[in-house]
Amino acid sequence: MNNKYFLYARKSTDVEDKQVLSIEAQIAELRAFAKQNNLNVVDVFIEKQSAKIPGRPIFDEMLDKIENGEADGILAWHPDRLARNSVDGGQIIYLIDCGRIAALKFPQFWFEPTPQGKFMLNIAFGQSKYYVDSLSENTKRGLRQKVRRGEYPSVAPIGYINDVRTKSIVVDKKKAKIIRQAFEFYAQGDKRLEDVSDFLAQRGIMSRGGKRIHKTRATFILSNPFYTGLFRYSKELHEGKHEPIVAKKIFDKVQEVLKQRGRPHHKTKNEPQDYCGLLKCGTCGMSITGEYRVKKQKNGNVHDYIYYHCTKKNKSVKCPEPCIRQEELDKQISSLLQKFSLRTDWAEKLLKMAEANKEKSAQSVSAFVLESQNQIRAINVKLQRLLDGYLEQDIEREIYREQKTKLLMEKKSLDEKMARIEQKQNNWLEPMKEWIKVASNLVKIARDSNLLEKKVAAKEIFGSNLRLASRAARGNPILPYEAAQRAAELIGEKSESLILVPEVGVEPTRDVISRHFKCRLSTSFSTRAFHTHGQL
């Protein structure tokens, strides 16, 4: 019987096919085999796709033509070229059972359409599937081992390069600098994701396809912990061996901005005024907002005003607080700022004291570093106990992932704080000089008409403590201005020579560093700034 054969050659890019002959080599070998055995090849089918899962279009087309009677035999290099999954293998055996396929020819495998032949073919298909399954499991096990070593088992994100020589991920020095700047750019809080996309495009950072980075991709970049030295794999956070390019502090700030800007914003009826967001209502605690109003008189005169009043959003309290005009509120804010201005002679002597005492901070910093190292060791112990509990199946997987993420984030923050303090233990001097400069300039700020500048200064002094009640603004200052207020009160009661500074000087103490490190460093040392040492 002269059978008609379809020649089928397949090659995929999967790992298991690396040692398989190329398409050209398969076709050459199969044509020589067909000529040697007088096989009638009526058509050639070439496919470049994996056979691990069903759904190969060219393979399906070939089987359809066999069912239509265009051929009754298949010529292939090996059974694993036809199928590596149970569906395709079962379909071929079914067509043999139905008589649609009368012959299968392989240079490296014997087959006859007999019970024994079909049994051997079934075994060959089963071996091919087993090879793929075991190879996949071995690959996954290898990836898990890389993760345990702190190696990211995937393509490096923008800012890094996959080094094929060392099989590691290294920093792309040119792009890493731009990515770091993008984080700092967005951390300012007033930028959009579209601005980040423009920022990257202007500096030559594009997608792998050469297109502009979409805002969705920009969100992924800004929320990727890989840039801080951590990475996610299988929905779990791991410590990486790669070099971080973004400080954890900046990364956390970016996450806050992403979260804040991700909330829905409703269009307001009035544009926000200069002092909006500065004060709270003294009665109900709600925010104070500003409104622009125009008043038309009967004589034709038009007057415009800006009023500030409680938003009255507390439904449980009927707020009776009246509104206040911007001019009156501005006078009160200016008066508050003047109370915290620093005398010129004090500023000069404080600068001299800071210069003389800056080196005494080393002992306090060492104590803080030692305390941080102890906390890190405690976290490592917790991580090991958490892992032991998970391996013993005492802890569920989701709880394990959640707790591990919290501990790793805490450890990363401590590492960065400790490194930052060790490297910059005397860098409090420049922020202190800046603070003294601002405090000396408060009188000028209070007298000027720049409301936004006054708002910034008031935020610096009072934080969120300013309250408006009975058309009067008042509030308690925060550090270091709280110390300024105490010193000013003492000056009224005592001579300046009796307002003493501790022997440690004006530099930040260990307690101040550990208590206020999360705030701006400039606020930590100046709790002593308004005291003297018998010199003022």
Image: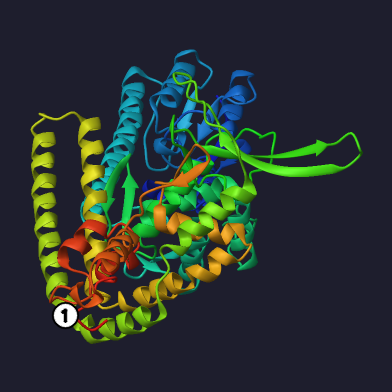
Q: Give the residue drawn at x 80%, y 43%.
A: 303
Left or right: 243 as drawn, with respect to 401: right
| Location of mark 1 (residue) | 360
- Depth check: give the residue in front, 339 or 277: 339
In the displayed structure, would residue 26 be above or below residue 461?
above
In the displayed structure, would residue 329 be above or below residue 521?
above
Kindly state the secondary structure of the residue where label 1 is placed. helix
Return the x and y of residue 299 as percentages of the image width and height: 91, 38
In the displayed structure, would residue 40 be above or below residue 13?
above
Return the x and y of residue 71 as percentages of the image width and height: 60, 26
- Work out which residue is located at the far top of the displayed protein and give it: 98
The C terminus is located in which quarter?
Answer: bottom left
Return the x and y of residue 520 as percentages of the image width and height: 35, 62
Which amino acid, by three-letter code, is at mark 1?
Lys
- Depth check: give the residue in front, 262 or 275: 275
Left or right: 71 as drawn, with respect to 485: right
